[in-house]
Image (tube, rainbow, N blue to C red):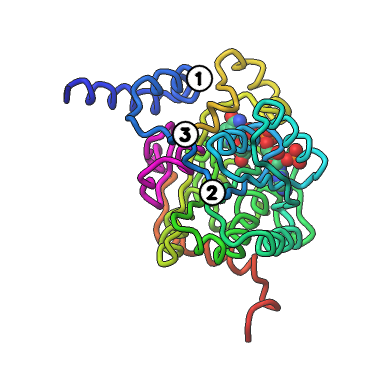
Amino acid sequence: MRIASDAISFLDTVLDRTIAPGYSRVGFRMRKRHWPDNDPRPESMRGRTALVTGANSGIGKATAAALAGLGATVLLGVRDLERGAQACRDIQATDPDADVSVVRCDIADPVSVTECAATLAHRLSRLDVLIHNAGVLPDTRQETAEGHELTLATHVLGPLLLTELVAPLLGAATDPRVIFVASGGMYTQRLAVDDPEYRESPYQGVTAYARTKRMQVALTPLLAAHYAPRGISVSSMHPGWADTPGVATSLPGFHRLTKPLLRDAAEGADTVVWLAATEPTPASGHFWHDRRSRPEHYLRRTRYSDEQAQRLWRYCRDAIHPASDQPS
Ligand SMILES: NC(=O)c1ccc[n+]([C@@H]2O[C@H](COP(=O)([O-])OP(=O)(O)OC[C@H]3O[C@@H](n4cnc5c(N)ncnc54)[C@H](OP(=O)(O)O)[C@@H]3O)[C@@H](O)[C@H]2O)c1
């Protein structure tokens, strides 16, 4: 028995290191056959509330549908209310009992994030799960009204602000979980602590995307430690390669080439849903893929020190709370 489980673990690791098979639906389906018996139980999310950002399409929408299917009350955090309402209708067309509704949350806009947190505080007594799924891959360098590079604002600053603002609601839940949907693309990138706003080299959207996904993964253990006293667990994961509107639009060449091998959105969402709903709660502070904790580095050159990770976190906290907002 031990030999069989070692062989499965070895195969899983080989799939992970060889990237293309592991990230594709082939890897997902091979691993799925050997997962331990800790699928989220039917109805396991009944009585629990989850907020999923960027939930009007792709992996976010599939996550919202799956959590609602487990009985959760799911809030779709979206920047376009009509697209969010359409996603709710789509989910309920398949599952008429799905308890889904929309809350406006443009994660790159701190005003919208603050309003979203205020709406949640008004509507909820607690929040059980917060999923930072919203993502962008712009062609050119863009800045928010606050002067932050768009992928940094969307993948890092907005999620940090939202987590902080809803921490009291999360802290009121019995087993609160925060999950970042990162990307395997982050394996190629160092921590851009000296140039987090991508001002100092020619901009490439794919690099900006992967750098800020690296930041999500680097900040996960720091956030886990920060929120541990309130009982809040923090994880990050990557979904592999899934066929979503985002991939089709942002990476059309990659999409065309790999389409037959891509996971569907529900397969991409599997580990997010598992992290949100499985029992016991997976260990906080880790990076996951296909229900297993994964290394944060495959290349020596991407390694960073604790001091660099802390420096990035300080930068982000100052960006979220400009000097004028900080208590004197
Ligand atoms: N698909 C993959 O293979 C893959 C691989 C690795 C990682 N991921 C990650 O998975 C997550 C979901 O991506 P996806 O593939 O499902 O792409 P998608 O279909 O484009 O979904 C992205 C979602 O994010 C939303 N969004 C973007 N900016 C936002 C903002 N400022 N505020 C609120 N929502 C915002 C989009 O809303 P709009 O409709 O308003 O634009 C959309 O609903 C992303 O974080 C992505 O980086 C995906």
Q: Is mark 1 within 8 Å of ligand 1?
A: no
Residue annotated with mark 3: 42
Q: Is residue 86 positioned above or below 313 on the image?
A: above
Within the image, what quadrant is residue 293 found in? Answer: top left
- Of the image marks 3 and 1, the number of the one nearer the N terminus: 1
Query: Would you say the residues marked 3 and 2 are in contact, meaning their CB atoms lie under 8 Å apart?
Result: no
Nearer to us in this view, 103 or 195? 103
- Residue at screen point 70% across, 28% down: 245
Q: Magenta stretch containing residue 191, yes or no?
A: no
CA distance separating discs 1 and 2:
32 Å
Q: Which residues are magenta?
A: 273-301
Dividing the image into four equal quarters, which quarter contains ligand 1? top right
CA distance separating discs 3 and 2:
13 Å
Q: Position of residue 199 (x, y in %)?
A: 68, 54
**Dot 3: what SS?**
loop
Q: What residue type is disc 1 on?
A: Arg
Residue annotated with mark 1: 25
Q: Nearer the viewer, mark 3 or mark 1?
A: 3
| Crowd tier of the residue under label 1, counting other residues whose Cα lies within 10 Å: few below 14, some 14–19, many 20 or above | many
